[in-house]
Amino acid sequence: PNEQRRRNALFGTEETLRIFFAAADRLLKNRGLLVAIAGAERTMDMLAALPPRMHAERLLLFLHRMDADAEWTALVARKNGRGALKAGIRILSAAAAADESSSL
């Protein structure tokens, strides 16, 4: 409950993302990158809120374990980009992080 209230306060209404992305569109130079992270439940809101010149290039879903629902989504968009959208999944568990760091 507290976590949901916190998310609602941080991400507000449906217009919040549209306003934020419009500001980023005005500030970014041509081919500049926007990275936005939000709760997974806002994934479609993020994609819908992108201005026409901002093209989604990457969408990452973050999970605590493979059999869990996504907690967070990271969206990478490029101003006046032409790349196709690539999607991926990342596991946030401590064991997965330890395995990944030992392979470096």
Image (tube, rainbow, N blue to C red):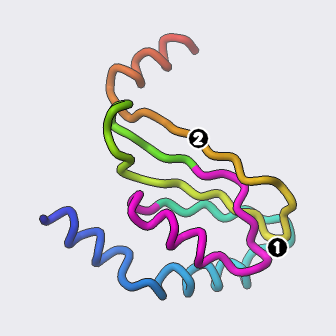
Q: Is residue 63 above or below residue 30?
A: above
Image position of 77 (left or right of 53):
left
Is the C terminus in the top left, top right, bottom left or bottom right quadrant? Answer: top right
Q: Is residue 9 above or below residue 91?
A: below
Label annotation for residue 29: 1
The amino acid type of the residue labelled 2 equals Gly
Q: Residue at x 52, y 38 (%)?
A: 89
**Residue 52 lies within the magenta run:** yes
Query: Which stretch is magenta?
Result: 38-59
Residue 20: % across, % down:
55, 81
Q: Residue at x 86, y 71 (%)?
A: 30
Residue at the far top: name it.
103
In the picture of the structure, the residue carrying the numbered disc 2 is 88
Q: Residue at x 28, y 78 (%)?
A: 9
The amino acid type of the residue labelled 1 equals Lys
Residue 17: % across, % down:
51, 79
